[in-house]
Image (cartoon, coloured by chain):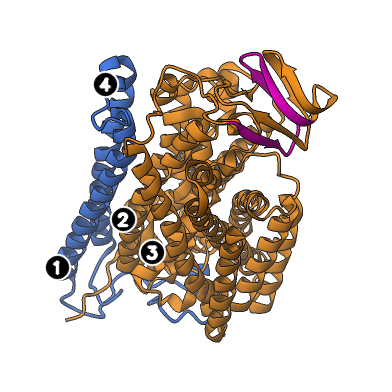
Chain colours: A orange, B blue
Amino acid sequence: MMPLVSVLLVTIGTLALGTFGLRFARTTSNFFVASRSVHPAWNAFAICGEAMSAASFLGVPALVLVFGIDMLWVLIGWTIGFLLLSLFIAAPLRRFGSYTIPEFIGGRLDAPIMRPIVATLVIVSSWFFLLAQLKGAGVVVREMIGTPYWVGVAAVGILVAANLSAGGMRGITFVQGFQFFVIFFAVLIPFVFISGHWLSNDDDRGFITDEYPTFVADTTAEYERTVTVDLPADVVVEAAGSIDGETVDGDIELNAGTLTIGEGTTIVWPEGTPAPHADSIEPLTGEEWAAPFNAASTGGGHARYSSIAVLFANMFGIMGLPHIVSRFYTNPTGREARRTNLWVLALIAPYYAMIPLFGASGRVVAPDLLGNGNADSATVIVSERLFDGLGSEILTSIVAAGATAAFLSTASGLLIAMAGALSHDVLHAGIPQFRAAVWAGAAVSIGAGLLVETIDVSVLIGWSTSIAASSICPLLVLGVWWPKLTKRGALAAALIGGGLSTLAALLSMVRVVDSGWPLAVLSAPAVWSVPLAFASGIIVSLLDRDEVADIGHKFALMHLPERRSV
Amino acid sequence: MRGYTVVTDDVMALVQRQRRVALTLLACILVPLLVFSLVVGRIDALSTWQPLGLLTLPWLILGPGVLFSIVAIAYVHERIALRIENEWSDEHADAPGADRISAPGPTEATASPDDDGDER
């Protein structure tokens, strides 16, 4: 009951603030860039609200639970990505003064043709990210309230679209600021209690042991979809549903080996049983899980390469993610955009430092997540398993509120980036078309969101960041810092980087290869597609004689500081 | 532009200075990370040492260690970038309004009708 109340409170707060934002939504500038009047601190809260997404709140703990320390490279990549925004993008982009990334690229290169092309990249990249949020919504709402998966997906899509079409960027800035505080405290409060639990002497179970994960108590595991698992030892369990195609109801002996557990099956695993794990995952002892470059299931068995590739994809991906970058347009000046990003880093680093504890704890108290295809719910389940009674319920409710805020906030930013690109850069239209684009984007995303239930949040995020890193990021960096970038060079960078990373994502999705270096190269393409995009942009520009006119003026626009008031 | 008397070379000199600072600071975080990733897997004592009891040294380095170092680097960049801009402003702001950079025609970037926060 309490988790339901907390989810409803966040939803009502979101709607109330969205309604409050209505009064400011009058002009195009209000809708796209919040009249460029957002204070650095509040803008940082809003950016953090966007960045603290289902990917970090649910996806990273799931990755840490399964693969261990190597997944910290995801968080490091994101944090370095924000540093790169400070170093290279925030201030110049704001000073140039566009409404959207496609408009910036079109203006910087005197190339209106680039606007729909970059808009397409923005929409595709944002769309994969949005699907991850909707998937997170479906999982969390089902876990908390017991509704079918589609309820969370549809509810979040409609709620976010309603808020955005009413208040635009100005309205959503208030909402995202509020959601940031909900998310931050939803991590901080359980973190204090969970770390207190592990540091106290009451619990002698550790993260780093020489054993494979085992159930520490009789554990009821629900299998919401059909999974194939490897069972390490013979065991007698109580089960209801189907195992290896046979209907079961009551006590049954399971033999070590591969099992197919049917959708809707419930199994009570006895205390002390080694946890079954999905057959695609290499089981790790606690020591292997805690040692760097040991996650043999990642990157086709090349864990060191995979870690570096993850770092690359995420650091350059953040730099090119439209919903993050476009928020700098809402600051009054370039200096304040840079200061905003410093605030963002100061707020997000502690959050990222806390998040892995949920995955590590989940490995000890919820090892059933290694095999039931539901690792994305680790953050929500840990408090429930670790504590008893009212304390457990309160902490679980707080986490549920945070998860709700996480996918609402990020989904808002993504939908505004998509609708802005579609209405402003493709249709060249105003507020009515922006509203129509919001609802169209939401409708398509809800439909697709229903189809991605079996795809991990981290996979969807990986595709999104790969496309952003390999196409939008090179355009921004070269556009801001390299005066010789030409229209054709930009086109080459966007098409080669974006095309190859999309192709790699598709090929790894359909499992053209399933092991070794080919899988490593295809599953984490950013490590080669980003340098390739930069190289093609530079080479084609150097060969191109059609240089951009008035480059001195454009660079002055981006780089000259605002005058200090005397 | 923005009240400065400038020629393109002045702008490019500013760009070059800011770019050098940014790349140096980026190296300050990437080089130690690279060294760490090369060293840590090869020295068992480093990988298994548990200075605070619960987690090993790599968890502490790749977790709070790296994350808060990045914040520190961003803070240093904010200070240096601001100082460079202020110095540049002081050197070039003696003739407000005299814009010697050729004024372009309206571009895509300047086409937004009701942008009220910008000076273009």
Whether tag 3 and tag 4 are in contact, CB under 8 A, the answer is: no
Tell which of A122 and A136 is nearer to you. Answer: A136
Residue segment shown in magenta: A218-240
Q: Quadrant of residue A97?
A: bottom left
Tell which of B64 and A322 is nearer to you. Answer: B64
Whether tag 3 and tag 2 are in contact, CB under 8 A, the answer is: no
- Residues at discs 1 and 4 both on one chain: yes
* Mark 2, other Cα within 10 Å: few <14 / some 14–19 / many ≥20: some
Where the C terminus of chain A falls, by quadrant?
Answer: bottom left
Q: Secondary structure at mark 2?
A: helix
Residue A516 on image: x %, y %: 57, 16
Which residue is depicted at the point 32% across and 31% down? Answer: B54
Q: Amino acid at mark 1?
A: Glu
Q: Secondary structure at mark 4?
A: helix
Task: Please state the chain letter of the residue tagged with numbered disc 2 in the rendered image.
Answer: A
Q: Amino acid at mark 4?
A: Leu
The residues bearing labels 3 and 2 have C-alpha atoms spaced at a distance of: 10 Å
Residue A410 on image: x %, y %: 54, 58
Residue A256 on image: x %, y %: 67, 13
Tell which of A195 and A218 is nearer to you. Answer: A218
Whether tag 2 and tag 1 are in contact, CB under 8 A, the answer is: no
| Residue tagged 1 | B91
* Mark 3, other Cα within 10 Å: few <14 / some 14–19 / many ≥20: many
Q: Amino acid at mark 2?
A: Ala
In this rendering, the label closer to the viewer, 1 or 4: 4
In this rendering, the label closer to the viewer, 2 or 4: 4
Q: Amino acid at mark 3?
A: Ala
| Residue tagged 4 | B46
The residues bearing labels 3 and 4 have C-alpha atoms spaced at a distance of: 37 Å
